[in-house]
Image (tube, rainbow, N blue to C red):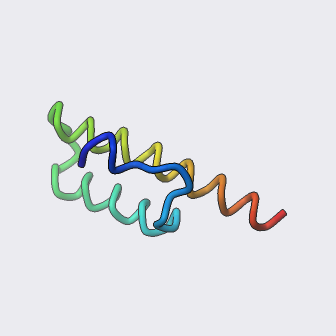
Amino acid sequence: MSPSSVVRGSVRSAAEVNEQIRALWQRTGGSLSAQDRSEYELLVVEWAVAVRGDVVRAA
C-alpha cells in the first residue's frame, strides 16, 4: 500500500478499514516489520478519515 492509495474522503467504510487492520495484526502475529508498520499507519489514517466522514454524515 503506497501513501498515494490513501485518499481524502475514504471510499471504504471505517468497518472495512478496521477489518483490514485486524487482518494485518493477525497476519503478522502482532509484530510489525518496517513495511507492515507503514501499511498500518496508512490504514489508521484512512480509518480516521472514514470515521470522521461517518460523524459528519450523521450530523
Q: Is 54 on the left-hand or right-hand side of 18? A: right
Please say if 15 is above or below 24: below
Residue at 35 percent across and 55 percent down: it is 21
Q: Is 51 on the left-hand or right-hand side of 25? A: right
**The one of 33 and 5 positioned closer to us in this rendering:** 5
Q: Quadrant of residue 33?
A: top left
Q: Position of residue 32 (x, y in %)?
A: 20, 38
Q: Position of residue 20 (x, y in %)?
A: 33, 61
Q: Position of residue 31 (x, y in %)?
A: 19, 40
Residue at 37 percent across and 43 percent down: it is 42
Q: Is 59 on the left-hand or right-hand side of 48? A: right
Residue at 47 percent across and 43 percent down: it is 45
Q: Position of residue 53 (x, y in %)?
A: 65, 58
Please say if 13 is above or below 53: below
**The one of 29 and 19 positioned closer to us in this rendering:** 19
**The one of 18 and 59 positioned closer to us in this rendering:** 59
Please say if 21 is above or below 33: below
- In the picture as drawn, the residue positioned furthest to the top comes out as 34
Residue at 52 percent across and 62 percent down: it is 14
Q: Quadrant of residue 39?
A: top left
Q: How many marks?
A: 0
